[in-house]
Image: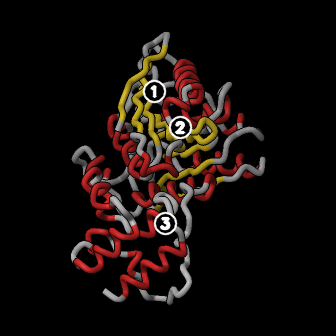
Amino acid sequence: MRFNTVSFEPNNAKLSCYLHDSSPELQNAAVRPGILVFPGGGYMACSDREAEPVALAYMAQGYNAYVLRYTVGKDHTPEEALKDAEAALEYIKKNGAELCTDPDRIAAVGFSAGGHLAASLGVLGRIKPRLLILSYLPTLEYMSQGIKPHPSLTRSVNASTPPAFIWTTQNDTMVPVDNSLAFALELAKFGIPFELHVFLSGDHGLSLAVPSTSGGSGAMVNEDAAQWFPLSVKWLKNMWGDFAYSQVEKVPGDEPGKKRRIDTAFRELRKNGLSWEVVKRYIPGIEAMIERDFMLNIITPRNLKGQIPGLTAETLEQMNTELDKT
């Protein structure tokens, strides 16, 4: 993993970048979608519980992730935070090649005030993310009478607002459910795709709703509400597709339910001396290759089709026939 931090003027907002290392074994993920996370905190702070743990959760699903610690505090405004968000998104887009992040596939993920910021970026920003993932966010005008005044968002939704995944809980007393419902209704008016999940129970500020992000509070653990995260990943894949991969190629003679020898890991084939001699004959230098990269032990002969000169579908079939005799 690569990690670096970038600062933005004028208030020294910090963007933490969590990037996958490049690898020739991950050619189908050389360029990845990006997830830009805005923690909550009432525009007075940025919650650690809704920052790195969320970024790493999305990173584990294959995305490059970014956390913006935007301008907060009693002497600053949400409008300043929006400028930070615009600068962060612009930085990722302009440096997509270096960051191995697709500039056209960036989702803004926000929690509470961070959800308001993410939605503001999608509704009011001079530069917009492609998708929004919004967690228990305030959107209605009456919420601006809380800790810090902030713009009402439902009146500003328009046809250019990005599609959104929205989730909250029915008994959230700090940011009532009508905020999420109202925002979803506005999206519906403009025909903007959205997915809305209202879980029956759960306090405000759940983050991932699992013990590791609970801060030790049982109120921050909710098995049902924790399903928002895998649901959001599924939604991202529905919107963007998954990482490209080829289906398992059928070789003449394949039988349903029967595992062919060419689909057996090299480490298993090595256990049979006769089988290993067949492998070495069809893939010269395989032992040296494994010595250089031990992880090759867990792949199969079929995985190397097209990467080894002469290892075609036809030669794989011949190899399989000979392996069946060993």
Q: Residues within 10 Å of mark 3 (few under 14, many from 20)?
A: some
Spatial CA distance of label 2 from label 1 is: 28 Å
Q: Which mark is residue 311?
A: 3
Q: Nearer the viewer, mark 2 or mark 3?
A: 3
Q: Is residue 182 visible?
A: no
Where residue 126 sits in the image (x, y, percent)? 68, 25
Q: Which mark is residue 43?
A: 1
Which badge, 2 or 3, is on the more N-terminal residue? 2
Q: How is the image coloured?
A: secondary structure
> What is the three-letter code of the residue carrying label 1?
Tyr
Residue linked to disc 2 = 101
Q: Residues within 10 Å of mark 1 (few under 14, many from 20)?
A: many
Q: Is residue 56 visible?
A: yes
> What is the three-letter code of the residue carrying label 2?
Thr
Where residue 210 sits in the image (x, y, percent)? 31, 54
Identify the image quadrant of residue 238.
Answer: bottom right
Residue placed at 53% from the left, 68% from the top? 312
Where residue 7 sits in the image (x, y, percent)? 43, 17
172 to 317, vertically: above or below: above
Which badge, 2 or 1, is on the more N-terminal residue? 1
Residue placed at 69% from the left, 51% from the top? 185
Quarter of the picture containing the N terminus is: top left
